[in-house]
Image (spheres, rainbow, N blue to C red):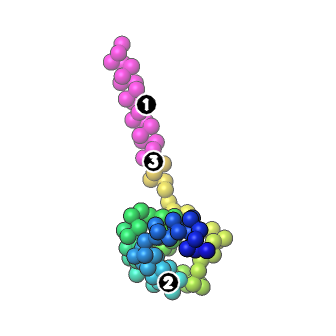
């Protein structure tokens, strides 16, 4: 079936074996709790693939959010129902507010120069 079905043949022809090897190694290291090496392998995977896919992005963000420290209760997986601490993004809100204020000032300056 895998050699006869057009969809399977097309998908198989587009596979990147180097990327797959890096991804499998990264997942094994991640599960085993060797996160620094897992992150390195995910970087190699992304380079071989040519873009960052959703799975590698989620795993990388989780490890970074955990500051690359394996949780003490690590059971070779993470609890997706657990609400991990939110990353502090207050600095982004301040930057956006500052940009909006600057836009208002620019608009006022334009209006004054036209009068």
Q: Is residue 59 visible?
A: yes
User: How busy is the neighbourhood of tag 1: few (under 14 within 10 Å), some, or many (20 plus)?
Assistant: few
Which residue appears at 44% of the width and 53% of the height? 91
The numbered mark at residue 94 is 3
- Residue 93 among those drawn in magenta: no
The front one of 39 and 73 is: 39
Q: Residue furthest top?
A: 115
Mark 2: which secondary structure? helix
Main secondary structure found in the magenta portion:
helix
- Residue 99 among those drawn in magenta: yes
Residue 19 location in percent, x, y?
42, 73
N-term mark: 1 or 2: 2
The front one of 57 and 49 is: 49
The front one of 58 and 15 is: 15
Residue 56 location in percent, x, y?
48, 69
Which residue appears at 41% of the width and 33% of the height? 103
Q: Is residue 78 above or below residue 98?
A: below
State if disc 2 and disc 1 touch (CB < 8 Å).
no
Residue 92 location in percent, x, y?
45, 51
Q: Which residues are magenta?
A: 94-115
- Callout in the foreground (3, 2): 2
Disc 3 to disc 1, how far (Cα)?
15 Å
Residue beneath label 1, please?
104
The numbered mark at residue 28 is 2
Residue 16 location in percent, x, y?
43, 71
The numbered mark at residue 34 is none
Which residue appears at 61% of the width and 74% of the height? 1
In the image, is 111 to the left or to the right of 10? left
């Amino acid at each position: 079936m895998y050699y006869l079905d057009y969809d399977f043949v097309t998908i198989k022809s587009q596979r990147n074996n180097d990327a797959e090897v890096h991804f499998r190694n990264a997942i094994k290291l991640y599960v085993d709790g060797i996160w620094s090496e897992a992150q390195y392998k995910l970087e190699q995977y992304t380079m071989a693939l040519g873009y960052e896919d959703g799975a590698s992005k989620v795993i990388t963000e989780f490890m970074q959010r955990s500051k690359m420290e394996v949780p003490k209760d690590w059971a070779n997986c993470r609890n997706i129902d657990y609400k991990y601490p939110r990353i502090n993004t207050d600095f982004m809100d301040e930057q956006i507010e500052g940009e909006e204020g600057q836009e208002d000032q620019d608009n006022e300056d334009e209006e004054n120069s036209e009068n």
